Amino acid sequence: MASDADVGRVLTLLAALGCGLMYGMFFAFSAFVMKALARLPASVGIAAMQAINVAFINRLFLAIFMGIAALCACVAGLAILRWHEPGAACSRIGSANYPIGVFGVTMLRSVPLNKTLARLAPADQTSAAAWVTYLRDWSAWNHARSVAGFAATAALVIAFGT
């Protein structure tokens, strides 16, 4: 039978892997996807990002994205119960970074920007200015998600190793 400590380690490992998965995806968008879209004519970039946003909203992605937040909540709860044990501080830091810096930023910043983008008509001349603003704002918030995802991953890996 698995001990509570074993369950905590497994949950921490799964949370670290999940955060790393999300970090990698957001990093890819920051490192080259958005830069590539910015090089396209506005109408093409808008249409491409609209298609990407539609493709992202699927059961698998949503289950993983929200499941990682739930895992982090479990890891945080265990870290609070084991306040003074080795790795507990890193568990708390890591498990807070994902729900706040990744999930929270997505819901409060990225999703509203994506909804605004979805209403644009790619071929409309006025959409080009909105595209420039979208690229700037969405990319800045995505960089924040990338940093938070990396920080969560690193802290949870450290916690797992202790």
Image: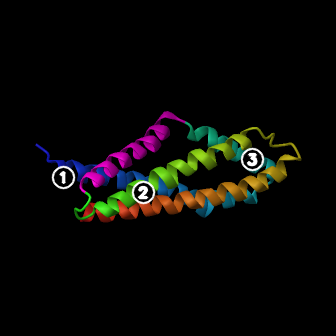
Considering only vertical position in the picture, is 34 above or below 61?
A: below
Looking at this view, is 7 or 87 the one in front? Answer: 87
Question: Mark 1: which secondary structure?
Answer: helix
Instruction: Judge from the rendering whether residue 119 lies leftward or rightward of residue 23; answer left or right.
Output: right
Residue 1 picture quarter: top left
Residue type at mark 2 is Gly
Question: Mark 3: which secondary structure?
Answer: helix
- State which region is magenta: 58-82
Q: Residues within 10 Å of mark 1 (few under 14, many from 20)?
A: few
Residue 9 percent location from the top left of the image: 24, 54
**Is residue 37 something one can see in this rendering?**
no
The residue shown at (14%, 45%) is: 2
Considering only vertical position in the picture, is 48 above or below 160?
A: above
Q: CA distance from mark 2 to mark 3?
A: 28 Å
Mark nearer the N terminus (1 vs 3): 1
Determine which residue is flagged by label 1: 5
Residue 89 percent location from the top left of the image: 32, 63
Instruction: Judge from the rendering whether residue 156 lies leftward or rightward of residue 1; answer left or right.
Output: right
Magenta highlight on residue 14: no
The residue shown at (42%, 46%) is: 69
